[in-house]
């Protein structure tokens, strides 16, 4: 074997053999000396190579340790906002909704507040966009007061007067107030999803679940508010009053219907809108096209659609088919627990069908809070 290929063990063995050869009187001392020198050189090379490898290993270990420390420092100094906007948190939150919270708790080990798990920015935006996509709820003023909320409103009051210096004091104002008590209730929507959907991770899973549930809940909230507007009487008590506009029974509404309804609103009802069934919108446009001259039957007001209102063609005497009013000033939505949708998974009820039931819940109170801020449009004989 070539000396430059020998291992340390082989060098030691050969060195012993050479030492024994020195006892032979016919030994070639010069050759033995040269070989011993070459063995020592090979031994020195092996030692040097070992030292080099050791240094390289130590360098790699040190770099890994430094990188680990740096990552640990970065993790510890990340804000809660940064964590919940990270891809890792989005993925962990999706698994948390499914029932596995280990990954999420690990990310929040130093950042959770009183055990509350904050939603990712992605989820917050999905919920926010759902409320904004629902045109009616997007315009309703929102509050976030805990428990039942009482809102006062003015039923009647004397107006202001001009007082001339030296004249008798003006008569004390006669003010009558009403109070609306807003009691929150749960709006729920459930869907069933397949095991394949449950296998989705992160953003794809959250988009699938929240897109469906949040919009449907926002839509139901709008329907409930419409029902409360329709339930208002014409005289204020503990419920603000609402005026009523009527139109004659005919194939299509009169072209001045919206103008007549608008005229019945309180002067404090700014930024009014029209709410109607989409089919009713078509009836109004037919009336507009049949007028024979340029006209805007909607008087420049935004039209919002809600099909819980009866279509004009199906409305009978006394049935509301459209509403004109100010959602911003006349209505209020109170969210005692915030706008976030609570989601629960039930993998047992539909297990025999390989489906998982997903239930979304929103806790909200809805109410009309100002008199004469809405006008119902009905048919009359």
Image (spheres, rainbow, N blue to C red):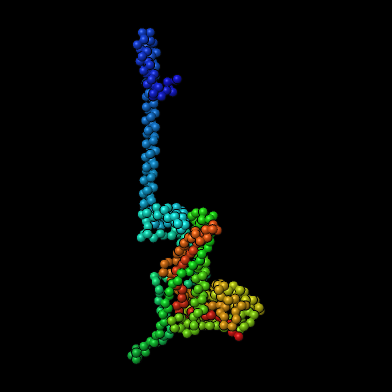
Q: Where is residue 10 in the image (x, y as percent from the top left)?
A: 40, 22
Give the percent coordinates (x, y) of residue 87. Answer: 46, 53
Q: In this view, does 343 lie above or below 182?
A: above
Quadrant of the rendered image containing residue 81: bottom left
- Image location of residue 309, percent across then percent down: 56, 75
Q: In which quarter of the image is the N terminus?
A: top left
Residue 61 or residue 188, whichever sits in front:
188
- The image quadrant of residue 316 is bottom right
Image quadrant containing the C terminus: bottom right
What residue occupies the far top of the structure in this picture? 26
Along the horizontal axis of the image, is 350 left or right of 158?
right
Q: Can residue 293 be seen in this view?
A: no
Q: Quadrant of residue 377?
A: bottom right
Q: Which residue lies furthest to the left in this view?
A: 166
Q: Nearer the viewer, residue 92 or 263?
A: 92
Residue at screen point 43% across, 74% down = 183
Is 281 left or right of 153, judged from the image as shown?
Answer: right
């Amino acid at each position: 074997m070539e000396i430059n290929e020998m291992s340390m063990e082989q060098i030691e063995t050969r060195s012993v053999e050479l030492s024994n050869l020195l006892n032979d009187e016919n030994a070639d001392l010069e050759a033995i000396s040269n070989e011993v020198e070459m063995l020592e050189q090979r031994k020195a090379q092996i030692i040097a190579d070992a030292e080099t490898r050791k240094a390289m290993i130590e360098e790699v270990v040190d770099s890994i340790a430094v990188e680990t420390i740096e990552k640990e420092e970065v993790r510890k100094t990340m804000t809660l906002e940064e964590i919940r906007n990270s891809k890792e948190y989005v993925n962990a939150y999706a698994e948390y909704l499914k029932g596995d919270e280990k990954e999420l708790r690990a990310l929040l080990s130093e950042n959770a507040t009183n055990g509350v798990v904050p939603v990712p920015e992605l989820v917050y935006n999905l919920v926010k966009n759902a409320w904004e996509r629902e045109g009616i709820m997007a315009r309703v003023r929102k509050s976030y007061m805990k428990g039942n909320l009482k809102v006062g409103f003015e039923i009647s009051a004397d107006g202001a007067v001009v007082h001339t210096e030296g004249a008798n004091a003006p008569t004390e104002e006669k003010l009558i107030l009403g109070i609306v008590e807003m009691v929150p209730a749960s709006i729920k929507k459930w869907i069933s999803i397949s095991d394949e959907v449950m296998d989705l991770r992160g953003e794809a899973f959250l988009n699938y679940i929240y897109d469906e549930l949040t919009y449907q809940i926002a839509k139901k909230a709008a329907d409930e508010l419409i029902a409360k507007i329709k339930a208002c009487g014409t005289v204020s008590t503990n419920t603000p009053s609402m005026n009523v506009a009527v139109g004659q029974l005919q194939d299509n509404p009169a072209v001045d219907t919206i103008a007549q309804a608008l005229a019945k609103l309180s002067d404090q009802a700014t930024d009014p809108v029209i709410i109607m069934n989409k089919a009713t919108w078509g009836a109004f446009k037919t009336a507009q096209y049949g007028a024979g001259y340029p006209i805007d039957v909607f008087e420049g007001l935004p039209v919002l659609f809600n099909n819980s209102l009866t279509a004009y063609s199906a409305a009978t005497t006394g049935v509301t088919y459209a509403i004109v009013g100010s959602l911003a000033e006349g209505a209020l939505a109170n969210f005692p627990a915030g706008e976030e949708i609570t989601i629960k998974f039930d993998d047992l009820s539909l297990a025999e069908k390989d489906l998982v039931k997903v239930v979304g819940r929103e806790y909200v109170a809805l109410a009309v809070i100002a008199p004469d801020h809405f006008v119902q449009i009905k048919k009359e004989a």
